[in-house]
Amino acid sequence: MNDEYLAEFEEENGYLNFASVGPASRSARRAACELHDEIARGGGSAVGILVPAYEEARAVIARGLGVEDGFATSVPTTSSGIMQIAFGLVGSGGNVVVPAHEFPANRYPWLRAEAVGGPQVRVVEVPDRRVTPAALADAIDADTRLVAVSLVDYMTGFRADVDAIADAAGDALVLVDGIQGLGAVATGLGRADVFVAGGQKWLRAGFSTGVMGVSARALERLAPTLTGWWSVEHKDGFEIPPPHRPLATADRFLEGSPNLPGAVAAAAALTVVETGGIAAVEAAVLERSGAVLEIARSVGADVIAPWASDRERAGIVTFRIPGVDAVSAVAGLADSGFVVSERNGWIRVSPHATTPLDVIDAFGDALRDQVRNA
Ligand SMILES: Cc1ncc(COP(=O)(O)O)c(C=O)c1O
């Protein structure tokens, strides 16, 4: 990775937990702080600061997601973006298809919307966690309004082929929860209709820095169920009683004033990714997670590896070691300076492009110690 990219980060080397939280870059933190400072000085109208700063950030977000300005917006979290889409389908009838093992952020919105008359939720069991067109095909029919998948599975690291899923979805919209990939692997809206990701993990933008890109047909089909005062035409025409017409752009998915510090932090974080170059970042992430995979196999671990090639994986490696308690091992690794997660009895390791390769070697030594001492 180039020096400019590396200089953005200052986490401890043994931090291997980006699938949980990605310590934010200097630029992302600075962007949010500088904006707070500017508003705090109270020199002019906060709205006069907000609107141009938001528009600038939104343009960077659009570029980062590979969409035109007008098709991108900021969201506080992955969940809030998905909620917007789920409630936008209330009244459309039909069904929504979602794998059973999705992270709950991509389950609750569909259930909540279903409870108030939204599409019926079709939960698809995918025992091998390979979310492929074939795995979803039987559940998709002419009444399917939307198929919702993760770009990268939070548990196994399986990376879905979103374009192929979009083909299989036919006329249904496709929503991608991209939080476990954005900032680590090359991605964007592509052929999907909604790409939504919190910025607190691989993007390294901090909390409340989500981004969302949508397609033209998503804008056409989704009702503005949760559209608020900011997201309508003539929003400042307070003398004209609501409802005003919703914006034609993705900003119709804002419930109120934009989350400005979050949007500028997300834009700064996406700019940092551009500085490193996403191809280089992705290669570095795959090299490091590949090294973790080798280490896990070398200690006899049972690795959940649903991928058939490197194109089907990203930064996450999850395993368990026969005879080794995952909770104790994760605690022991933490004592040796390595931060990883325990998930349902499994150990999840998730290095980023900034993780030095010799630290992965040292992690291997620490893991071997855990096995020896178990
Ligand atoms: C796949 C996935 N989606 C979403 C989230 C988080 O959702 P939110 O940004 O709404 O907190 C996580 C992890 O926290 C996740 O792993």
Image: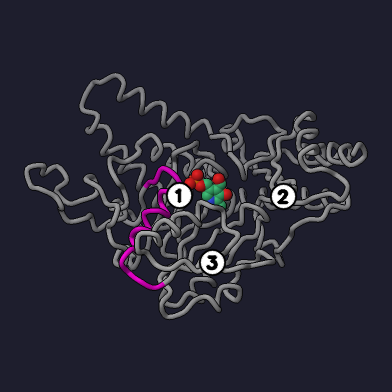
Q: Are marks 3 and 2 in contact (CB under 8 Å)?
A: no
User: Marks 3 and 1, Cα distance to the nearest angstrom?
Assistant: 18 Å
Residues at marks 3 and 2, CA–CA distance in whole angstroms: 30 Å
Q: Is 41 situated above or below 315? A: above
Locate residue 12, reporting x and y percent.
68, 29
- Image coordinates of residue 198 in percent, x first then y, are 48, 46
Q: How is the image coloured?
A: one colour
117 and 92: which one is in front?
A: 117
Looking at the image, residue 16 sits to the left or right of residue 320; the answer is: left
C-alpha gap between disc 2 and disc 1: 27 Å
Q: Residues within 10 Å of mark 1 (few under 14, many from 20)?
A: many
Q: Amino acid at mark 2?
A: Ser
Pair 3/2: label in front: 3
Q: Residue at x 90, y 39 (%)?
A: 374
Quarter of the view holding residue 91: bottom left
Q: Which residue is mark 3?
A: 123
Select label 2 or label 1 by which is in front. 1
State whether residue 113 is above or below residue 263. below
Q: Secondary structure at mark 3?
A: strand
The answer to whether the residue bearing label 1 lies less than 8 angstroms from the nearest atom of ligand 1 is yes
| Residue beneath the point at 20% across and 51% down | 232
Q: With 199 as the anchor, is 290 left or right in this view? A: right
Name the residue that disc number 1 marks: 79
Element type where label 1 sits in the image? helix
Decide if residue 313 is in sight here: yes
Q: Nearer the viewer, residue 270 or 129?
A: 129
Quarter holding residue 370: top right
Instruction: Provide the residue span drawn in magenta.
Output: 74-94
Disc ID at residue 289: 2
CB atoms of marks 2 and 1 within 8 Å: no
| Three-letter residue code for mark 3 | Val
**Residue 362, horizontal then vertical, whole percent:** 82, 36
